[in-house]
Image (tube, helix red, strand yellow):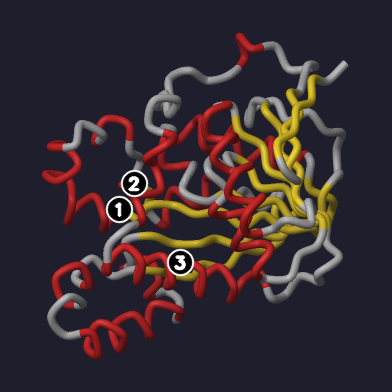
Amino acid sequence: MADRHQIGSAVITSAASVPARKVDRRIIDYSSHAPVYDERRFEGRVNRYLEMLRFDSFRVLARAHPPGSRVLDVGCGTGRGLLYLMRCGFRTVTGIDCTPAMLEQAREKLARQCPDGRVKLIEGDAFALPWSDASFDLVTSFNFLHMFRLDRQIALLEEMARVCRPKGCLIFELDSIHKGLFFSRYLEQRRVADRTKFNSIWELKRMLPRSKFIRYRVVGTGFPVVYRIFSRMPRIGLRIEAITHLAPLGWLSERVFVSAVRR
């Protein structure tokens, strides 16, 4: 039987059917970082600007799906992706994450910004999702897949596809290899380079085989040079960003959103 606890309007359910030993502990343990995660990652003028671009890029892909779609966000963390989904008008949204402390942050955030309780939070393993096949119309993942090497990314996408209905859609975020070229030294200083996977367009073809996916679309967000340009010349930064929605230029971005339709 699942364990449930609630503060405010958001409920966290522990997926008792998923053994704790199956959770991939090779990823970063975010328990100690959870209370300050959003502040460190998303505060500041440039970070807020890049966050706006991420939402705009996601919205380009999400607007093809009706508000009544059943949506699952995998690796939901502190709930920023869940808020994206709510802002896009989705009414039935579930988030899953393996770190209780991150889910606590998501629950508090949703209680403030989405008090009607439309979002369900599940504590569980992204590689063993506690739902039957074809349970959702749309399955998303924000700022999550970069923590795994390619074979684990493929396994995760296979599990996401399993719970997505035929002709349903996966929308997920990847760090482009161009981000690695520009920021490898910075990432090494932060001691996360060995835990960050930068993907190329060629790897995407392995991640989304034709036997399982009908088609996919890539939308870019965040040119690396914008970090330097935006703080000094915002108009130029905005013009540069405008072209990243045009394929195949999206792969020149520091991050990409991928939309893949399941067979």
Q: Nearer the viewer, residue 244 or 200?
A: 244
> Which residue is at the far front?
8
Q: Secondary structure at mark 2?
A: strand
- Neighbor class of circle 3 (other Cα within 10 Å; few <14, some 14-19, many 20+) is many
Estimate the spatial distance between the alpha carbons at disc 2 and disc 1, rounded to whole Å.
5 Å
Residue drawn at x 48%, y 17% is 25
Horizontal and vertical percent position of residue 43: 32, 58
Q: Is residue 133 left or right of residue 6?
A: right
Which comes sooner in the sequence, label 2 or label 3?
A: 3
Horizontal and vertical percent position of residue 187: 20, 42
Q: Is residue 7 left or right of residue 221?
A: right
Q: Secondary structure at mark 1?
A: helix
Estimate the spatial distance between the alpha carbons at disc 3 and disc 1, rounded to whole Å.
17 Å
- Three-letter amino acid code of the residue under disc 1: Ile
Residue drawn at x 69%, y 58% is 114
Q: Vertically, is 131 above or below 172?
A: above
Q: Nearer the viewer, residue 200 or 65?
A: 65
- Neighbor class of circle 2 (other Cα within 10 Å; few <14, some 14-19, many 20+) is many
Q: Nearer the viewer, residue 234 or 161?
A: 234
**Which residue position is annotated with label 2?**
198
- Three-letter amino acid code of the residue under disc 2: Phe
User: Label 3 near label 2: C-beta < 8 Å?
Assistant: no
- Where residue 7 sits, quadrant-wise, is top right
- Which quadrant is the N terminus positioned in? top right
Residue drawn at x 31%, y 47% is 40
Question: Which numbered tag is attached to residue 54?
Answer: 3
Which comes sooner in the sequence, label 3 or label 1?
A: 3
From where the camera sits, is residue 138 visible?
A: yes
From where the camera sits, is residue 263 visible?
A: no
User: Label 1 near label 2: C-beta < 8 Å?
Assistant: yes
Residue drawn at x 16%, y 36% is 188
Question: Which numbered tag is attached to residue 177?
Answer: 1
